[in-house]
Image: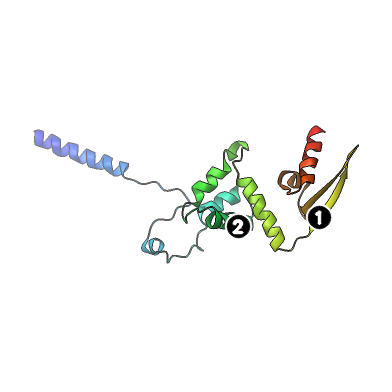
Amino acid sequence: MNARRSAGSLRRLSAASAVVTTVLRPACARPLSTNVASGSGSGAEQPSCPRVFLRERGYTDNVAEGVLKELAANWGVAAGSELPMVKALAGAWEVGADAGLDALAKAVERELARTEGKRMVSFVVQAANQSVDCQGFEGMSLKDVIDHGEDRGSQTLGQLLECV
């Protein structure tokens, strides 16, 4: 009788362990195959997770690609571990708290503007008792100039508009 009970318990345990050993993968993960593991698979059939994550945050394809290249080239992020770094830089993006991703994306956008030949636009804001010289690339909004401008005028403009 104990032998039957043991055999029945083993069957139940093996059925339960099959449920426990089921591996759930994120929607964007590819199953491992010899092509992917050996590096000979092409990434063209499915976009990688960091690109999808960046696109979902509102970044264009070329900015997302530039962010990933920057992380790999200058930040030492290994291939395959870009998504955790991008998520860490995004911070608590659900509530609008950024931990550096926006600044990195804006730097990539400025570099893309330089390489695409966009012109630098200079403008003067006349306040009551002073004038502020600012610069930005064509296509930037005043908010972009204030948040990501590289000159002293953009900082001063930000302070003036904050007081208003």
| Residue that appears at 57% across and 38% down | 92
| Residue that appears at 59% across and 54% down | 67
| Residue that appears at 23% across and 42% down | 14
Which kind of residue does numbered mark 2 sit on? Gly
**SS of the residue at dot 1?**
strand
Q: Closer to the camera, 82 or 26?
A: 82
Circle 1: is it few (<14), some (14-19), or many (20+) Cα within 10 Å? few
Q: Closer to the camera, 150 or 146?
A: 150
Outermost residue toward the right in this view: 128
Which kind of residue does numbered mark 1 sit on? Val
Judged left or right of residue 139, residue 104 is left
Q: Which residue is mark 2?
A: 66
Judged left or right of residue 126, residue 37 is left
Q: Which residue is mark 1?
A: 121
Residue 120: x %, y % from top left: 78, 57
Residue 94: x %, y % from top left: 59, 38
| Residue that appears at 55% across and 55% down | 74
